[in-house]
Each structure stands twice: as C-alpha cells, then as structure tokens.
Amino acid sequence: MTVVGAGAQIDKSRIAELTAKEEKRLNDSTTGSGKMYERAKKTMAGGVPSSYQVRDPWPIYLEEGKGSKVWDVDGNERIDYHNGFGSMVQGHAHPAIVKAVADRVARGTHFAAPMEDSIVVSEALADRFGLPLWRYVNSGTEATMDAIRIARAYTGRDTVMKILGSYHGHHDYAMVCIGVPYDDIGDRDDIPSLPYGAGIPKAVSDMTVAVPFNDAAAMERRIERLAEEGRLPACVIMEAAMMNLGVILPEPGYLEAVREITRKYGIVWIVDEVKTGLTVAPGGATEKFGLSPDMVTLAKALGGGLPCGGIGATEEVMEVVLDGSVYQVGTYNGNPLTMAAARASIENVLTDDAYAHLNMLNDRLMNGCSAVLEKYNLPGYTVGISSKGCVTFSEKKITDYESFMENQRGDLADLAWLYAMNREIFMTPGREEEWTLSVQHSVEDAEKYIAMFEEMAHDLTA
Ligand SMILES: Cc1ncc(COP(=O)(O)O)c(C=O)c1O
C-alpha cells in the first residue's frame, strides 16, 4: 500500500463542476426512481425501509439482481459492487442458493424448532472459525447485542469497550462513538462516550467506552483507569480490520497485543465479523489474521441474502447460555429458509476455489486502481483484503478514526460514487464504505471498474 499524490493540487472548482454534472446525469437517468420515491414517501418514512438507504433527491430503487449485476426500476444495468452493504459475496440468485431456498420454501418456512441444516451450518462454522459453540440470530445487530449480553453475564461486569468510529449495529450498547465530529473526539486517552443519534439513554451510552484503533497502549491505559474506577470492561468488541471507514488494516502486532491485554484483564474479546466473516477467508478475519477470540459475531454473508446472524464462543463463555443464566432467544433464530441458504452457501458456494477467485479479482482491481492513482497523481491509495477493498482518497495513510476524519478527501469519495453509478457500477453509498466482490464477478467486471476510475482521474486532471 503506497500513498501517492501527496501535495497534488486538484482544483476544487473542477471537483464541484464535475460533481454537479454527474449528479444531473444520475438524476436524469433515474426518473423512474424519482416517481417511485414520490409514492413511497407517503407511507414509508423517507421513502425507504432503513435510513442508510436515504439519498438526496431520491434513492435508486432496484428491481432485480442476477450474478454480478443489478437492475434498477428505470432498467439501468449495473455491476454490483455494493452487494447489499457487503453481504452478497455469493452474487445474486446463485443457482445453488436458489435451489436450496426453492426446495425449502415448498416444505414450510418457519417452525421455531431446531433442524438438521442448523446443525450442519454450526459444524462448518466451528470448523472455520475455531470456536466450538454457536447460536443464531437474524441480523448483525442481534448478534453483537447478544454477544455483549453473554460477555456481561460471563464476567459479571457492565462496561463495554469498543473502537472509536466502529459500527456494530443499531442497538443502544453499540451506538456510541460513531460519526463523531472531529472537534468532539477530544483526548485520545479519554474519548467521551457520545451516543450516535437521539433516543439512546445517557445511562446506557456512558457504559460504552471507546478507544482508538491500532493503538494497544491507549487501550491498556484506558482499561487501567477504568479498573481504578471499578469499571473494568466485560468485553472489547471490535473488527479485526475496520470496514466502516473504508478499509483500515491492523498494524503488525496490534491484534496480538489486544489479545494479550484482554486476557490479562479477564475481558472477553469479541471479534465482530459481520462484514469480514465468510467474505475475506473461509474463516473470516479470524483465519486471515490467525486470531483466537473468545467470541465471533457473524451476519451479512452468512445467510446468502436471507436475514441471518450467528454468535460463536468458547465453551467456557457459552456456559452462561447453557446453564440458563442468559436467555439467548428469538422466534426466527435458525429459520429453515435462512439455514437452507446458509448451508448451500457454505457447502456449495464459498469453497476454497471461490476464495482463490475473490483474491485474484481483488488483487487485479486494487492493482488497476493503484496504477490509475499513480498515473494521474491523485492523492490516495488502494487497500483491501480478499473480496473487500476501496480507494482511500488521502495524502496520508489512515490508521484510525481520527486520521480518517483529518485526512479523507470526502469530495473525491463523493465524486467517485457518482462516476461509478453513471458508468454501470452499482457502488456502496457513503464515504465510509468499500466495494464487495462476489464469486460471480468476472475479470471483465473488474476491468470496467478500473476504466470508470481512470475516466474520473482523467477528467479531474485534464
Ligand atoms: C461490523 C458490523 N457489525 C454489525 C453490523 C450490523 O449488522 P445489521 O445491519 O445486519 O444489523 C454491521 C452493519 O453494517 C457491521 O458492519
């Protein structure tokens, strides 16, 4: 990963001019979405099922997906790099998953009783992630919420430690210290516990304490201070590689240090693999970085496009569920349709060959984008692992939230999204997101992305 383009002067008015032109082009080609928005907003708040789908002046409404492609309601075809916020590493309507779901749907879709598919999936997850015991939920939010409760019960402590700027779902325990304005970050050693949005009781957000990523010494100092206050954390919940600030990789030795520190203070180490699990290696970041967490949380790719989540733990930690002290429950946990999709995905789609394909494609995409940055002297670098990656527009390497807020060129990130959307690439919205490849993406798909990126670089510097 080499940062190029430091000091390069890119005319801000040129960026603004291109942004206005591309916004108009996107709006002109998505008038059907505009009409649908007018109808939708009358009954669906903001015209969307989730606030993360809001876009001004209207969201792009989709109709269909197949393989690496999606089609919107105006009939625009795009190669999907958004992939359902990083879930669809299998690609859309994969024949193995379509068959498994079709077979299941005609034989009953919900019983709230255990079935063989859920056993097969937990056997595979135990094997892939090296954690012996698993439970299921229906989303990443439920996975991290239950994991935190289990950790609290296991340790008898209340405080939760997380990483500044990291997203772990929308429950109160984790909606803290996300999207914090730069001026409110404060002292790295004493980051205030700011709730993310309204409706979160202060008493709850105060129980969650954030520390910076890639700084094990800061983590240990904060833990020691919490210990002095009688507030030792129950858990540290974190991603091994941050996937919600573009992609930020762990510096050498950082994850090993976190494992050592959490062990030293009897803190449960929860590695949140909602984004990385099953997408960056068969056993996610746990395998990729050789980790031994106490708990892992999964969702997104696990269900192959159906709502799903999973929690893996050591026998020792999961004992609080086994002995009945924690109620880890849910009507739809281990739903037959979801489990049929998850089994088909694990057995027939996300094979060793699939990961080899993803690694090859991602390398090609990253190398292509790096070459464009270098050729046109744009400030930035490409970074990623396996199916995930992004171009980070910055004159400096970003290692945590603070350096992200300080250095990321949001104007270039916004323009890149518009260029993608107007050139047959369906890209994840938001300055914090990355691309996700699927096993059904081709070399030609990757070349199209690189060509789109080169066109933007050319137009910016012409
Ligand atoms: C790392 C991480 N954890 C948890 C979640 C929450 O998952 P869900 O949206 O399925 O509730 C997300 C969602 O993006 C995530 O990226």
Image (cartoon, grey):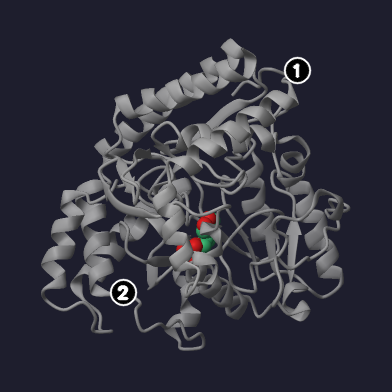
Quadrant showing the N terminus = top right
Quadrant showing the C terminus = top right
Residue type, label 2: Gly
Instruction: Say if disc 2 is inside 8 Å of ligand 1.
Output: no
Q: Can residue 437 be seen in this snapshot?
A: yes
- The reply, left or right, for residue 215 in relation to residue 389 is right
Q: Can residue 296 be seen in this snapshot?
A: no
Q: What residue sits 38% from the left and 25% below the top?
A: 448
Q: What residue sits 66% from the left and 71% below the top?
A: 234
| Label 1 Cα neighbours within 10 Å, binned few <14 / some 14-19 / many ≥20 | few
Q: What residue sits 67% from the left and 47% below the top?
A: 257
The residue tagged 1 is: 9
- Return the x and y of residue 44 as percentages of the image width and height: 48, 72
Q: Earlier in the sequence, mark 2 or mark 1?
A: 1
Query: In front here: 442 or 399?
Result: 442
Residue type, label 1: Gln
Query: In front here: 56 or 107?
Result: 56
Q: Answer above or below: position of 288 versus 456.
A: below
Q: What residue sits 28% from the left and 84% below the top?
A: 112
The residue tagged 2 is: 334
- Return the x and y of residue 100 as percentages of the image width and height: 16, 61
| Label 2 Cα neighbours within 10 Å, binned few <14 / some 14-19 / many ≥20 | many
Q: Answer above or below: position of 3 versus 276.
A: above
- Return the x and y of residue 17 as percentages of the image width and height: 66, 28
Looking at the rendered structure, the secondary structure element under dot 1 is loop
Query: In front here: 452 or 364?
Result: 452
Tell me the CA gap for discs 2 and 1. Answer: 54 Å
- Return the x and y of residue 267 as percentages of the image width and height: 65, 65
Q: Quadrant of residue 9 in the image?
A: top right
- The reply, left or right, for residue 119 in relation to residue 429 is left
- The reply, left or right, for residue 167 in relation to residue 100 is right
Label total for image? 2
